Image (cartoon, helix red, strand yellow):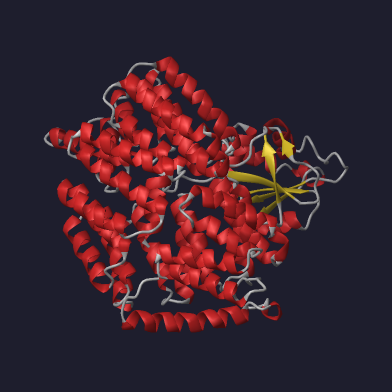
Amino acid sequence: MRNRWWIVCVLLLSVASVAFGTDYAIVVNPANPARALSLVELGKIFKAKTTIWPDGKGITLVLREPNSPGTKFILEKVLGGTFDEEKAVLSEPSRKTAVPVVFAESDEEVMRIVGSNAGAIGVIDVYNITGGVKVVKIDDKQPFDPGYILKGR
Amino acid sequence: MKTRNYFFWMVIAILMASAVARAQESAPAASATDTIPVTTHSAVAQHAYEMGMVQREDRLFVDEGLEFFRQAVKADPQFALGHAALGYFTTDPKEAKQESALAVKFIDNASPDEQLLIRWMNSTKNGETVVAISAMNDLLAKYPNDKRLGNLAGEWLCAYQGANERGEAVLSRLLKNDPRYYPAMNNLAYCYALSGQPQLAPPLMEQYVAALPNEPNPQDSYGEIMRMLGDYPAALEHYQKALQIDPHFNASQVGVASTYALMGDERKARAQYLVAIKGTSERSTQIGYRILYAMTYYRENKPRLAREEFEKVDAEAHSAGLTVQEAEIHRAMALFNPEAASALKDLDEAREDLSDTRTSNLLPGDRDNELALILQARAFIAVNSGKTEAAQATLKLLENMAQTNRSTPVQEAYHSANGAVLFAHGDYANAIAELQEDPQNPLSLQLRAEAQSKAGRSADARKTLETLASISDERMETAFAAPTARMALKRDATRPAQGGAN
């Protein structure tokens, strides 16, 4: 297997690296016309200030369980406060009729829910992306772009 | 293909039988089988494609594998997956661009799942990482028992994306399902070696060599792993065993040469590189070996001879139309050029190589990856020589590139150059964070150690220097930065660690 790795080292250089966390991707149903959101707009969805998409479909937020490292990171990045404060935002009773939050046990489950619900928006590790969901840009950037806000460390 | 021995032909006979079996599996009626179909109207093309995969992926006979892929697309010029595979595996950037374009041109000839595989192969080359991940995951879900697909994916994740944990998961799953699937065992060992778990690699290598005692690649891989771990005598022993099994296994020939180079025996290294150069008919590979040959003069501190040798290789690369290699040669010359102004001129030439009209023959990804490295080197040289404005201007160029090209080399180069500029402005905390985004590049590690030291994080600086000192590979950046780190550690060996690690 030497040659491949030699090519990697000598021609591309510095490609291999240790795992440094991951980028998180915001995903929607492929039928959803949304292609991009600003971080502010995403924050409004998380806070249930925005409850419907421009085409009138109700929004459902799909996240991994609230104490998972990914969700913790996302809440802090999107909502800007401390984790405990932001977790409380998600569990407010009024949300259930505004933007319901569904907690999934895995990224696969997040994608299954988003893929079968035209109004759902979810967050997953970018390395788990499949063709069953669509990645939306945040502040005009997508995962792996420099300055992408949901880049985990 | 070269004649080897009786065992070799036995293996080939078995593999050909397997190839026929796979070819039968891939007929349209069998699309529900475990492996991705291969669609071509030509039985010769289908057989050559399978043999290309056997040689390139399973046995690691790289040149032979490429030759089979070329035969496949010659037999069926509209064979989309054949073109995509050749474009994916070739080391010649011109061929990569041409073949990827042909794969797209004839993509309608391929089945939907092959189209997905073609999309994955092409996207990995073009820096469209999200598209590539999506295609890869869809294929892995649809063909969970396609071992070769899983192996390709695991290898890409580890080697090209630095997503070692994910690559390890894919490869481990393959081995759980089939503990005798040796290509995955081989890749998993490399993944471990690169992800900070090197102790897990040798036991896998022991299994690999024991299982395939008459194949050269297991010994070759074992040699490379041992070299990565810094055990040069063991590395030489395994490379030589590989060459005893097959004297034409050129990867081991260059392995021997590079091990001597790392040991400081540059004369022996040059003699061995010359054998390796003669042993390959791939022009781009030859030029790559010539670059390593020229590097030996830098290693023994003979910069004039090194420069002369690089100029000769540059002329050859130019006449062969290998513009990326020409640029790489100028980048090497810059890195070892003690005069900053002259080094920046070398880098200007490197950029000119890539802006040459001939680069219209290159995939944007191949051109951009090298251009990013040139700009990164430029930023570092400018910072080191106090030319902060030049560094800032270079960073701007890299930033623009990084906005549109999401490939790992481009992104790492951008963050690293940004770290260098932040360092120049005395913003050590942010410089460290940015340089950490390029964790295996010796230039970034060197500057990171310096930034940590200036920030009062002596223990972190020492750790970073230890990481840098332990890198044992053929890269020009390693030859440039690792010896200094080793000397610094030796010098500081008696001093106690200070500052907090975090």
Q: In the displayed structure, would residue B211 be above or below residue B196?
A: below
Choose between A78 and B453: the one closer to the eye. Answer: B453
Q: Is residue A67 visible?
A: no
State the residue at coordinates (51%, 29%): B398
Choose between B348 and B209: the one closer to the eye. Answer: B348
Q: Where is residue A18 drawn, in percent x and y? A: 41, 48
The single residue placed furthest to the right in the displayed view is A56
In this picture, residue B469 sits left or right of residue B44: left
In this picture, residue B272 sits left or right of residue A36: left
Q: Where is residue B263 drawn, in percent x and y? A: 17, 49
Identify the image quadrant of residue A55.
Answer: top right
Q: Quadrant of the N terminus of chain A?
A: bottom left
Q: In the displayed structure, would residue B414 be above or below residue B98?
A: above
The single residue placed furthest to the front in the displayed view is B319
The single residue placed furthest to the left in the displayed view is B494
State the residue at coordinates (53%, 63%): B70
